[in-house]
Amino acid sequence: MNVRELALETLLAIEQQGAYSHLELNEAIRKGRLDGRDAALLTEIVYGTVQRRDTLDYYLAPFLRKARRLEPWVRMLLRLTLYQMVYLDRVPDHAAIFEAVEIAKRRGHRGIASLVNGVLRTIGREGLPSLEAIHDSGKRLAVATSHPEWLVRRWIGQYGFEETARMCETNLRPPQSTARVNRLRATVEEALDRLRAEGMAAAPGHLAPEAVRAEKGNLAHTQAFRAGLLTIQDESSMLVARALDPAPGERVLDCCAAPGGKTTHIAERMGGRGEVVAVDVHEHKVKLIEQQAQRLGFRCITPLALDSRRLGERFAPESFDRILVDAPCTGFGVIRRKPEIKYTKGKDDVASLVAVQQAILRAAAPLLKKGGVLVYSTCTIEREENEDAIARFLADHPDFALDDRLAERMPEPVRPRVRSGMLQLLPHYFDSDGFFIALLRKKV
Ligand SMILES: C[S@@+](CC[C@H](N)C(=O)[O-])C[C@H]1O[C@@H](n2cnc3c(N)ncnc32)[C@H](O)[C@@H]1O
């Protein structure tokens, strides 16, 4: 199967079976035994087509008016070919169209091939419909950046038009490829030297002092990664263990821990001394925590499969020095990494996640010692799951208060963004994931 056909199969699996784009892509690269160049092209076409879906459909619509109901694979083939024509300079239009027509002949019949050929050539000749024809600015932003309109309107309500526009634009750009250095095994400089010796173009991160950034290539495929020097993690996410600020010898509870990115960061900051109880509801995901703990060489991590809404049945009151609730959330801060979520997550998901988040917070609260700190974090930008969730929790738990020390625990550029113990990072602030972090203290 050639790259475009693999792209078509991958995109259909994402749309029809709800597959995750990154997992499906890895599988396609493995199955197709693609070399670096073809793997990069496949990745670009798949991510780009998912990212720009609604814009591509807007561009295609006037040329499909006369077509009878299109089969999903034909629409997807048109989308992925138009994506190459509009957004990929290195692919000449005629080459992209030729490939599409060949695929249409193989998968369908001459009629479909001629429809595909006709639509794409007409667009090539007549040009794309203008987005200026959409008069409503919210709707235009939604179509131009391919986000559902309900989401764009919601964000405009929360952040204003300008901020939302910048965020939507940033969501279309590839994310930074970063990793956290295991500083019990190497300094950032040593890790960078190791990576460069392997031929990687790597540099220090922009935000977190423990971060390295790959300008090209996959950090997870390096010797340095295999040797336990690195953990793949976004820089925003690295700020969470900093907010928690655990000390050696303490007992820490990580309530939603898999695959263990923050658990291992916490263990590292404790110098490997003390205990981190790492809970996740999914047994198979708990195995991932075990693997990471082993790869990085931490013995102080106790993985546990448990629904954190029932923590009270397992642990004694006031038995932890610090607690992290890195809650399940809509993930709207990581649209760049998982672009399909902007189409699959709806308002109902927000409501049901809010209920789970509150239930986990409620169960975790009694387990914290007096004077201890609790960090609540999400990789979303939804106020209901973030500031509102904290307000609700505090209303029910007068023994907790927001802790101003969050600002001093953050790297310099982030500090002005901290508002009374809470931090909302949007993806365009530092070109990192959208993240929310709140630091709470239990009163003595
Ligand atoms: C945001 S992810 C955690 C990421 C992780 N902290 C890290 O840094 O690698 C949220 C996790 O919560 C888990 N989860 C969802 N509902 C849960 C529950 N009721 N109890 C415990 N874990 C839950 C999910 O399986 C998922 O792994």
Image (spheres, rainbow, N blue to C red):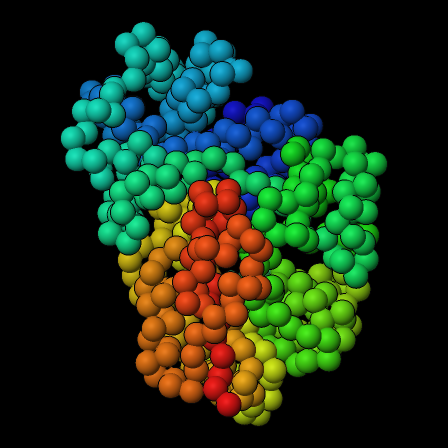
The N terminus lies in quadrant:
top right
The x and y percentages for residue 348 are: 29, 61
The x and y percentages for residue 27 are: 61, 41
The residue drawn where x is 32% and y is 80% is 395
Query: Compared with residue 376, is residue 292 higher up or lower down, i.e. above or below?
Result: above
Relative placement, left or right, of 196 versus 403 is: right
**Frontmost residue, 340 versus 103:** 340
Relative placement, left or right, of 322 versus 74 is: right
The residue drawn where x is 70% and y is 67% is 269
Outermost residue toward the bottom in this view: 316
**Frontmost residue, 245 versus 355:** 245
Relative placement, left or right, of 331 versus 59 is: right
The x and y percentages for residue 230 are: 73, 52
Q: Quadrant of residue 124?
A: top left
Outermost residue toward the left in this view: 135
Q: Quadrant of residue 284?
A: bottom right
Q: Quadrant of residue 82?
A: top left
The x and y percentages for residue 327 are: 47, 67
The residue drawn where x is 58% and y is 78% is 322
Q: Is residue 37 visible?
A: yes
Relative placement, left or right, of 402 versus 75 is: right
The residue drawn where x is 51% and y is 63% is 407
Number of labelled discs? 0
Q: Is residue 109 visible?
A: no
Query: Compared with residue 361, is residue 27 higher up or lower down, i.e. above or below?
Result: above
